Structure formats: structure tokens, C-alpha cells
Amino acid sequence: MSTEKKSFFGVMKSYNKNFRIASIMELFERWAWYGLFAVLALYLTGSTDEGGLGFSHIEKGQIMGIVTAILYLLPMITGVIADKIGYKLSLIIAYLLLISGYYVMGEVTSFTMVFIVFLWVAVGAAMFKPVASAIITKNTDESNSTLGFGIFYMMVNIGGFIGPAFSSTLRTQYGWKIVFLQAAIVIAINLVILLIFYKEKDRVKNTETLKEALGSSLKNMWEAVKDSRLSVLLVIMVGFWTMFNQLFYTLPTFIEDWVNTKALHDSIAGVSPWLASFMSGGGDSVNPEMLVNIDAGSIIVFQLIVSYFVLRMRHVSAMITGFIIAAIGIGITFYTGNGFYTILGIVIFAIGEMMTNPTFSSFIALISPKGKEALYMGTYFLPIFLGNLLTTLVSGNLYQAWSDKLTLLQTEMTNRGIQMPEVTKEFTKNDFFASASEKLGMSEVEMTQMIWDNYQPNKIWYVIVGIGIVTILALTVYDRLVIRPKEKQDAIPQ
């Protein structure tokens, strides 16, 4: 292998066809996934007269949290299957599951069916996830892998930005079903790209049976987590992922319930009518998913700058700093109903995310014993799995009790002795709000402010930021007791 240093353009030219195809497919797959996931909380809890399903936040938390948790466990199995049957066949199966799953998910309405079909989608995503990364690994070498994975990560965020932007406009103008159809069409494009352009070369056939391969995978995972340095770090990172998940699970519905996005829209329109229209999907209020999407946009713009800054820091110091910044950012987004502070909080959170997430991956590689790097990296998804399970309680049960606008308004009307019908498909959430507003003699804006003042639904930020603070303290102790002593012994590069 040549060790000659290449220019940037020389490295860019070194990537082969399969690398480029995998990068494009990653962009489209993330477009489809985040195009749905960024608006899923709104769809699940939305009023039925607007095409939403009218589920409770507990049901929303269970669907999003449990299914996504399973998604991040499945690559341990689907990766083994892909090695056994080949990458191209694995991707064909993944795309067929995703196309059918996304479409059918827009057609079902009961909690049980939505849960099952979303799990179906998750299996397809889990079939795709390890294969895309493996193709990038197999088609890069020491001379271009660093930039190669940087490009790959960039594709993730470009897709993660485009998807919600399209969904925001589409669902505002054409209703919810078009969001699911969009996801299915985008994956169908991936299937066409795969069938026409991708050629699987130099496939090394695994001689193990599927049962043996799965057994080896689980055994290797256990061998890695027996290392206390790694297992303690993974437990600590559960806190980060629980905090991070609030961006997609909880913040969209918090914005929908409590942030006056019409005032934000009018302020933006005074500066740029085009931007206001883009962020509102042509409506008169900024869509919550467009605010959340600022996170992905910030990563696209600032990741290289932040990564360069982080290069000058110790890994754990960078992660602790990133946690602190992320906790401040997520706290701001839930503390106030002012849309401008929501934007500020999301940008601050994105900076913390950019410092933490890539550094975590790199740090696992650093603490891995020589020759066991891949083994240790295989544990990366475990804290994401546990973080999603914990998010089920925060975004579901806790939000339902403390911050759900409908629940708090129902409590207020009961306390005032005002009789109100139950929310049903015939008497929707929006009907309840309108009727309550009339009976209270308030505009809906005044009613929302009254509930905010009486019940302080933003107090959920204490729990979310509290999780961040516990994570910061735990990582600081871990650094003092485990990492710094190892660094003094030159066991871990600084």
C-alpha cells in the first residue's frame, strides 16, 4: 500500500464507484427515515381532524422509544446475516421491507398496528445500517478512510436535513399520508440505484452456519463489555442519548403545545419572507420539525470547524465539555415558549452534540486493546438502545403528566367545575381546545398562557437537564478515577 501523502483532491479521486454509491444510498435512506421520524411525534399525537392519530404521549413514547431501541439492537443480528448472504441481497431485503413498511404505516391507525408496522420499518433500517458502513469500510484504506467516513457522516446529516424539510412542506400542503409515500418513494430510488449500479466484489463467504455466527457475535460482545473501562463508559453514555432523544421525541410536541411559532413566523417574514414560508411549509406558523431540523443544518455547516477545535482537546475533556454545552442547549429549548430561544437552544445543543458524538466513537477505539478495535466498536449501539428505552418514560409518561397541553387543560376545566366532553374521533383534540377557549372566555393564545402560568409545563427541563448533569458528573469521576491514571501510565494516548 502506498503511504504517499495525497492532496485533498487526490483523496477525493481515490474513492471508487461502490463508495460513492453507498454514500448516496445513505443520504436517501436517512432522508426517508428522518423525513418520517422528525414529524412522527406530531403525527402520533396530532388531532384526528387534521389527519393525526390522537394517541396519548404514553403511547407515542412506547411506539418511538421501544421500537427504536429494538432497531439499535438488531444490527448485532442483521450484520451477521449480511455477512452470510451478501451485501446486495441484504440491501434488497432491507429496501423491500422499508418501502412496504413506510407505505403501510401511513394506512394503519390503531396503536397495535402502528407499533407492529413501525417495528417492520425498524427491521428494514437495521438490515441497512451495518451494510452501508461495511461497504464504506471495505472500499477505503488507510490513506482515505478518515475523510471517507467524514463524507459518509456528512451524507447522514444532509439526508437528515432534507427529509424533514420536504416533510414539513408536504404535510402542510397535502396532509400526512404524503409523508409516508415520500419515504417509500425515496427508498424505491435507492432500490433502483442498488440494482443498476452496485456490484458486489471480492465477497468473502463466511463458512460458519448462521447459528454459529450469531453465537460468535454475542460471545464477542460479552467479551468486550466485561472490560469495566468500556462498560462503565457505555452506561454513562446512556445519559447522553436519553438527553439527545428529547430533540425528536419530546421537543416537537413541546413546540406544538407551547411555543408561539406564529409570532416567530411573522418576525422571520419581516426579514426574509422566503425563509418564513420555507420554515412554515407555506402556512402562517413555523412547523416544529423545521425548528428541530436546525440541529442537522448546524452540523452540516459547523461539524468540520468543531472537529478541528476538538482535535486540540483530550477525548474525555471534549466529551465533558460537549455534555455541558448540550445540557445548556436542551435546557433553553424547554425553559421558554419564545421561539427565538428555542432556535438558540437547538444551535447550542448541536455544538455539544458535534463535540460529543464523534469523540465518543473515537474514544472507544482508543481504549480498545490492540486487535480488538472492531470488537469494542460493536458495543457503540448499546447505550443508544438503553437511552431509547429510558426516553420512553421521559417523553411518554412524564410529558403526559407534566407537560401535555390537553391533559393540563382537562385538569383545569375539572378544577373549575366546567363539564367537557371526552376527546374522541368525533370530538377531537382541536374541538376540545376551541370549546374550552369559548367556555373560559379567552382566546386560545390567552388560554395557553394561563395553563403555562398555572402548571409550568416547562418544568420537564429539570429532569432532562438533570440527566445531563448526572452524566457530566459521572463522566468527570470516570475521568479522574480511570482515564487519567491510565494516561499517566501511558496506557491510553492523550
Image (cartoon, rainbow, N blue to C red):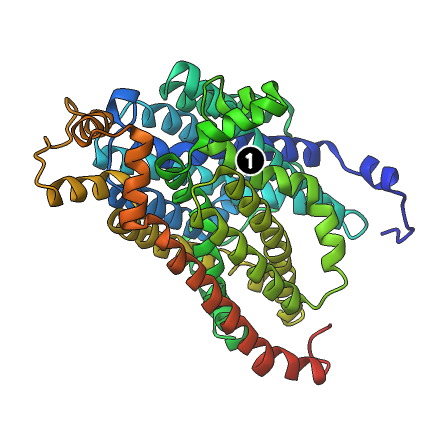
Q: Quadrant of the C terminus?
A: bottom right
Observer-nearest of 275 and 165: 275
Give the answer, above or below, for where 470 lies relative to 8: below
Residue position marked by numbered label 1 in the rendering: 160
Does residue 335 appear to the left or right of 61 in the view shown? Answer: right
Question: Neighbour class for label 1 at 10 Å: few (<14), some, many (≥20)?
Answer: many
Q: Amino acid at mark 1?
A: Gly
Left of 438 or right of it: where is 223? Answer: right
**Residue at 57% of width from left, 46% of height from top?**
205
In the foreground, 192 or 181: 181
Give the residue at x 78% y 53%. 142
Q: Residue at x 65, y 68 (%)?
A: 317
Residue 310's place in the image compared with 153, above or below, is: below
Q: Residue 351: where, in percent of width, then height? A: 62, 51
Left or right, residue 288 beside residue 425 = right
The image position of residue 86, as x and y in percent, is: 54, 40
